[in-house]
Image: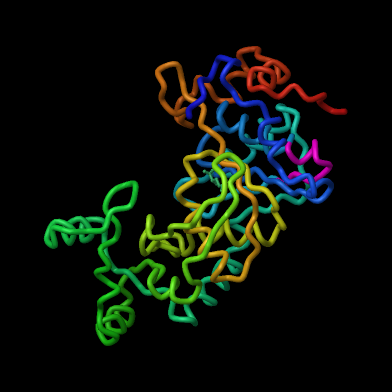
Amino acid sequence: MKLRCGSTVDLPRPKIVQNTADPMKHGSIITRFAPSPTGHLHKGHAYSALMAFSLAKELGGRFILRIEDIDPTRCSRENTDQIFADLAWLGLEWELPVRVQSEHRDDYTTAVQTLSARGLLYPCFCTRNDILREIERSGYAPHGSEGPLYPGTCRHLSQDERQNRLDAGAPHALRLDLKKALAETGRDLTWNDTIQGIQQAKPELLGDAVLVRKDIGSSYHLAVVHDDALQGITDIVRGVDLFEATHLHRILQALLGLPVPTYHHHPLLTDSNGNRLAKRDRAITIRSLRESGVSAAALREELGFTMKWGA
Ligand code: GLU
């Protein structure tokens, strides 16, 4: 399901989500909004942030803002500051200090070492082109929902070959050896998605995923799973575009011995042509709406959030 932006009729009200949340969580729920400062937030982000915030507030819980800026090639301080300004204008309040992922790289390295020590990761020296060539050459690559998966080229390297390349300082990512990982966790991994119901995790949809990128020494997947557990997040509200990633997050939780939050993967807002809203589309950023005279109350109402604000 996609949601039209600019119309109030087909936006699910936050109540839909709140009604499905576990009433036992009253007072103990912790939600978060975890944007990456790769551009300015738009209406879709506002919807997600408001949903996470109101879910926590209506159940007497806590709301946390986290900045996911581990990728210095795409994130900027200016965008982070803009996020703070936009969310404050929208009427959100969050706990301080805000966790900024780029300040905690050692934490993610420790998680990597935990997995590495158990032989669950392997170095991958492939470039994007190497991977495409290998897929073409073999004529076969397992498919996930977004196309061919990594064909496992570097998983098959001999120990000597691997060591020689590492000793020569060859740039490499670290991938999860999914087969070994599943041998540890078993296949009985589920999560509760309040919108789509109980889900059986299928990490094979992502294959041997990259857990440490060549260029940034970490990855979104590892950092997000680590931080959600560290911050005690009980309920993850985010767009359905991240639904598939949850299959991987679930196995990472099992491997790292972390609790499994409840997920609320909400539908995405679209523009009048049915396209997903994008950060590069300046017209619908929160900042541009504000600058064009839209009030925060009007935006909240358009998005379906009419709870008494500031009460
Ligand atoms: N940082 C991610 C993004 O901005 C979202 C992470 C999440 O909600 O799990 O796309």
Residue at far top of view: 293
Height in image: 35 above or below 301? below
Residue range corresponding to the magenta coloring: 55-64
Left or right for 168, reference 22: left
- Indicate the position of residue 282 as horizontal and vertical percent values: 49, 24
Height in image: 30 above or below 88? below
Residue displayed at 13% across by 58% down = 139
- Indicate the position of residue 51 as horizontal and vertical percent values: 67, 34
Left or right for 80, reference 119: right
Height in image: 196 above or below 11? below
Assess whether residue 57 is covered by the magenta stretch. yes
Left or right for 56, reference 130: right
Judged from the image, the quadrant occupied by ligand 1 is top right
Residue nearest the observer in this picture, 77 or 302: 302
Residue nearest the observer in this picture, 221 or 234: 234
Residue displayed at 50% across by 57% down = 221
Q: How is the image coloured?
A: rainbow
- Indicate the position of residue 93 as horizontal and vertical percent values: 77, 37
- Indicate the position of residue 137 as horizontal and vertical percent values: 11, 61
- Quarter of the picture holding the C terminus: top right
